[in-house]
Image (spheres, rainbow, N blue to C red):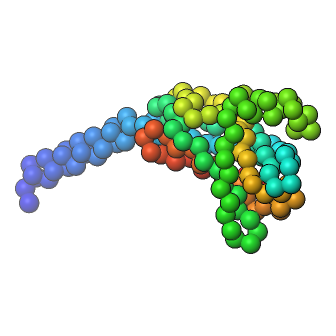
Amino acid sequence: MSKGFGIGFAITVAAIAGAIWWLADATKGNHLDPITKVGKVRIQKVDQNESIVVLDFSLNNDSDRKLVVRTVEASLDSPDGSTTDGNVVAAADLLNIFRNYSELGEQYNPPFKAWDEVKPHERIDRMIGVRFDMPDDKLAKRKDIDLRLEDLSGIVVDLKAK
C-alpha cells in the first residue's frame, strides 16, 4: 500500500465520520419523546357502578417539533390481570363535574383534550377525566391506570398512574 493511498484513505474516513456526526447532531431535536409525570389521582363515585378518575399530570416536550394530540384513550389494569377501557370525559363536562362534586377538591390545571398542542421545549400541566363503569371500591384496588396519547405523526405517549 502506498503512502499517498493511506493518507487519502484516512482523510476520507475522517470526512465520512465528520459528516455522520454533523448529521446526528443536526437532527437530534427531531425525535418526539415527551417526558410525562402523573401527579395527583382522584376518584369520584357517581353511582353504584360508575366512577370518574381525575388525573393531574405534566408533559414536557424536549424536542424541536410540536406535539399535537390526535387521540386520547384510557384503560385500567385490575389486580386479577383484566383490563377495563374507560371513556375520556369531555373538557366542558369535566368542569361541570368539579362544580357538582366538591369532594374532588380544587381544579389545579386546565383540562387536556384531543388536538391540544405542546410546543417545542414547552412543559404543560393538565388534568384529564376518565369514566369507568365500575364501583369506586373496585377502582381503588386497581393495579394501574394507563393513559395513551397519540400524536398526529403516530407517536404514542403512555402515562401510567397507580
**Residue lying furthest right:** 103
**Residue at position x 37%, y 34% in the image:** 26
**Residue at position x 80%, y 49% in the image:** 51
In front: 141, or 8? 141
- Residue 34: x and y, percent? 57, 41
In front: 77, or 45? 45
- Residue 112: x and y, percent? 66, 33
**Residue at position x 77%, y 29% in the image:** 95
Q: Is residue 54 left or right of residue 16?
A: right
**Residue 19 in which image quadrant:** top left
**Residue at position x 91%, y 34% in the image:** 102
Q: Is residue 124 above or below residue 41?
A: above
In front: 92, or 110? 92
- Residue 85: x and y, percent? 65, 56
**Residue 57 in which image quadrant:** top right
Q: Is residue 70 left or right of residue 50?
A: left
Q: Is residue 42 left or right of residue 34?
A: right
Q: Is residue 92 above or below residue 133?
A: above
Q: Is residue 23 left or right of residue 159?
A: left
In front: 91, or 56? 91
**Residue lying furthest bottom:** 80
Residue 158 appears in the picture as rendered = yes
Q: Give the position of the N terminus as an image quadrant.
A: bottom left
**Residue lying furthest front:** 48
